[in-house]
Each structure stands twice: as structure tokens, then as C-alpha cells.
Amino acid sequence: MSERDLMDSLPPVAANGLLDRRLFMKSIAAGGVGALTVPVLADPVGKDQPSWLLAPGQGAQGYGTPSRHEQLVRWIKPQWPLGATIQGLAFTPHQGLTGTYTPSGLHFEVNHHGIPDIDPNLHSLVIHGMVDRPLKFTVESLDYYPTLTRSHFLECSGNSGALWADEPIDALLDQTHGLLSGSEWTGVSLATLLDEAGVQAEGKWIIAEGADSGSLSRSIPMEKAMDDSFIALYQNGERLRPGQGYPMRLFNPGFEGNTSVKWLRSLRVTDRPAMTKFETANYTDLMPDGKALQFSLKLEVKSVITRPSNATVLPKKNAVYEVTGLAWSGSGRIRKVEVSADGGATWAEAELQGPVLPIMLTRFRLPWRWDGSPAILQSRATDETGRLQPTRTQLLDARGKHGHYHYHAIHSWSVDENGGIAHVYA
Amino acid sequence: MKTEESLMYMRNWILFLTIALTTCVDGADTPELGQPASEADIEQVFWSVFPDGENLPAGSGLAVDGKALFNIYCIACHGIEGAGLTAVALVGGQGSLATDTPLKTIGSYRPYAPTIFKYIRRSMPYIAPMSLSNDDYYAVTAYLLELNGILEPGSVVNAETLPKVRMPNRDGFVNAYPKVPRKYDY
């Protein structure tokens, strides 16, 4: 049907040229937008091809976004006290990701007091206290310093906090392991800036304060600050996102996430820690005897199987599947990951995806033939110091169940006879 | 070579080495763009208060005034008398830490009073931090400490008295850096 025929078949619906609202639907049915200008041949050779092959696609976007067919987003947990007004926690959806680098927009966030909208021209970092020369650095000035680039995971000490509960929660991997992400970070060595200020002999700690409305503050041992800490300015090649501390954050490789203070603006060199709210009220682990572990700074060795994981279903019995997941340690490289399909009775060493980088997510893989009977899948990691990830029973026996933070035990997935995967304690 | 010439040669050589080394060590490998930070610069960004009271501001407060302020600015989230609502409880829980239902509050858990004041002063009220006066923040701190039975009624709270407050859980923390104590390891 030609354009003219189509229009003739549709009587006006009101005066002055208004036509039936079904006109465009009919033209599309007749062969797409092109039908208005291009005559449709009787027997086009592409008639059985998908539509996206039959017309030029979209132009490029200034900033690319995922396919509109992909729905993977972070799980957002509203934080007290203002509920949905200030969204406090965003969890990386590891159930839908692979590789070891987390897309910047899916990197986890914990924002105790919301994300500040910082004008980089009005922001600076002040280093003061027990130094020879108190100094102020603008954001722009740091761009002229020698840069370093490091691939590191970041994990909140509250990651897997839901697993302290007596009963296993029925939730996707984001809710149990989503306060963990991996990125390439670029910035300036903290030792470089501290040397410029001239740290005095009695300076043993640094108190870092952020420029958010709540000013998250942490005390960092000087030996760490002088070793491998840096001021991160870029993540995965681009400027930090606001939720990651734009325009600058402290980064302490392998330390619990909140020590890498976002929106950093003050570093006070002192001879003692400040015992801030975030190193007393929060991020301390209550033990069964009523004492609490404080400054559990270095994250322990940990792993989890990301595929298959909760709520997925294996489509076929007597088939070979890939078991894959992530392993990491705040102490350095992952040396070994073992996988069990019988709840920890026997273990097999998985293949590690290289290069295995220190204090970075390491992906492991192992083929597994599922015969159709129930199974328990687990992984356990060993780091380069020889530290082995504990069982849940070992962890709870040592630290009770009210620690709230720093959960890092072996994680278990059950497989039922229908191929359904669920989170269990085993 | 005469002894005198030899000594002069050595002196020059040492002088040359000294200059060369000093030049290298003196940050020749970075542009050194830090600007001198003034007292005002530091005051603007440095809010941390230490357990011994370092960096506490001038001012003072009483619980009676703190109660009035609390009931305006804090009660909506922290509940009546700090019992907790959408935000954490600030009162109670003493003696509960070693039980199966521990309640961590200012009174039962926090080891130092000055750092409680610091957080309230720098970060509260949640929707308008730093919007009250130092006297106000001392008063709210006094109210919370009295509610927890830690201060006698009518106690004046200021930079001098606050560091002397003995918190019930003062000795409740064990350092886990760089290693978790053996007692709590698996």
C-alpha cells in the first residue's frame, strides 16, 4: 500500500487535516517509517531478518549507556533516619557481573550522610598538625603531581553483615556480597604530599575528615599512610564519581572501606588516634565476652561463588557447568581458591584468572558436572600469607554472632534436584 | 699531591656531593604545589576532637537546656528521651554487651565523651549539621549523658569537664591492628 493509498483510506477525523490516530501504526505495519518515502518491493531479500538489520542504527551517545535490554542496577537500601530521602547503601549486583573490574556506575556506595555536590574549584585538601609546613592543595594542583595507578578491590566492613543472622537470608548476591567492588584507581601517593609537608618524628597517626555533611572521620596509622595509601582522583580512567568521593578520596589498599575517606579535605597528623564515632560506635566488632575489636583495619581473606548463585536455575541435568566466583584479601594476592560440591567434604583447586593482582578481586573458575542430585557448592580462598578462609562455624566459635562487621566465612549454595540454587548455612 | 691540596680536593668533593644529594632529596621529583595553610584554613576543616579534649571549643551547656533542644531537633528520629525511633537509640543498654541481646548506645558502648560531642556538633541535626551554637551542642551532650546516668543532674559540660567524664565502657575495646588478638582468632 502506498502512502497515498493509505491516506486516502483514512477519512479526516476533524477539520483542518486531522487524520485517524492509527495512521502511523498502519504505516509501520506496512514496512516501517521508510514506507512513507521508499516504495516497498514485493519480495525483499531481507524479509526474514531481524528489524535492526534493516535500517541504520542510532548515532553514538556522548556518554555511552548499557543496552536498553539490560536491567542490571544496584540494590538500594534506604538508610535511617530519612528513609527514601537519602539513599544510604548501594550494592554491586555481582550476580549479573563477570570479570574483576566493576563498572563505575555499579560500584558499591555507603553514604552515611548523603552524597555532597562539591564544586572542585572550592575544594582543597589541608595537611596539618605535626608537620613542619601545614599545606593546602587545590584539586587542580594535584593533577601536576606524578600519578600512580592501582587496581584494588574496596570492601565495606559491613559487607555480608546479613550473614551473621541465625537463619540464611533468601536474597540475591548483591544483598549478601554487594558491598564489594573492584576498580582501577589513579591518584597521587600520600607519602609524596606528607613529605612535602614534613611529618615530624612524633606523628604516628593521621586523622582523615571528609567534606560530607556528616564528616566521616577515621584515624589511619602513619606506617600505612607512608606505605601505599594514596589520594585517588580517578576511577577506571575518569574522574571519581560523586558517590566515590569526587573530587578526591583517600585510598588505603586492603583496609576496610570507610577508612578510604571520601570527599577528603583534612589530614591531621597526630601522635594518637581520635577515637571517632566511626571507629568506636561503628565498625567495631562486639565479641561474646562483651569486649569489642577496634581497628580491624585489614580486610581478611574471602571468596564467594557468583555463578551459579541464589535464584538461578540450572537448565539441564547431567551437564557440565562452570562454577565461577571472586576471591580477595586485604593482605595481598590470592594464592589458591578451592571449590567443593559436597558441602566441604572434598575440595578441588580452581583455575585463577590471571594476572592475579595484590589486593584486587581474583576470578576463579572450575568445571562441574551436575548429575541431577542435590549438592552444596562452596568456595574457600587462601591468600599469599597462607591465611585460609574460615568456615562459618569456625568464625562464629571465635567471634560470636554479634560482631555485625567483618563477616568473611565460606559461603554455601544448595542445588536441589530441579537445579534451583538457594543460600544455605552448611 | 701535597696534603693540603688533597684535603681541599676532598672538601670540594664532599661539598659537591652534599649539594647534589640535598637537591635530589628536596622534592625535585614533584612540583611542590602545596600552599601554606593558615590557622583559618585549618580551623575550617579540622573538627575532630580527641579523648583528652584536644580541639574542644569554648562554651558550655546544661542538660536542662539540652532537653529543650533535643525535643526540637533530635526527638523526631531518636525518639522520646533518646529511646530510638528511625535513628539509633542513644540511651540504655548498660550491662547488655555480653548478653545475647546487646544494645549499643552512647551510654553502654561509647568509650569517650568528647568524641560524642564532636559528632553531634559536626554532624547533627541530620538535616542541618553545624546549625546550632557551641553552647547548644554542649547542652545536648549534657542531656544525653544525664539520661544515661553518667552525669549527675545539673553538671556543667564544657571543654574542661567533658574529658574527665568516665564512660562505663571506657575499657571495652581491644585493638585488632595489625593482628586480631589470639583469643578472638579461629
Image (cartoon, coloured by chain):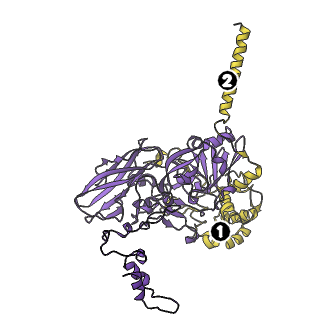
A335 or A230, which lies in front?
Answer: A230
Relative vertical location of residue B25 with respect to residue B102 in this rendering, above or below: above
Label 2: which secondary element: helix
Disc on the earlier residue, 2 or 1 = 2
Q: Where is residue A401 in the image (x, y as percent from the top left)?
A: 45, 58
In the displayed orientation, state which residue is furthest to the top: B2
Give the amino acid type for the residue marked by disc 1 in the picture.
Answer: Ile
Give the amino acid type for the residue marked by disc 2 in the picture.
Answer: Leu
On residue A147, the disc is none
Colour chosen for chain A: purple
Colour chosen for chain B: yellow
Hey, which quadrant is residue A244 in on the image?
bottom right
* Residue A325 appears left or right of B162: left
On residue B127, the disc is 1
| Residue B172 visible in image | no
Q: Position of residue A89 (x, y in %)?
A: 52, 63
Hey, which quadrant is residue B129 in on the image?
bottom right
Disc count in the image?
2
Query: Badges 2 and 1: C-beta atoms under 8 Å apart?
Result: no
Label 1: which secondary element: loop
The residue identified by callout 2 is: B17
Q: Where is residue A387 in the image (x, y as percent from the top left)?
A: 42, 44
Hey, which quadrant is residue B83 in on the image?
bottom right
Q: Tell me what residue is drawn at x 35 percent, y 52 percent.
A: A379
Q: How far apart, in angstroms, are the residues tagged by discs 2 and 1?
A: 60 Å
Q: Tell me what residue is drawn at x 76 percent, y 49 percent.
A: B38
B19 or A52, which lies in front?
Answer: A52
* Residue A371 appears left or right of A284: left
* Residue A32 appears left or right of A218: left
A232 or A214, which lies in front?
Answer: A232
Q: Position of residue B51 (x, y in %)?
A: 67, 52
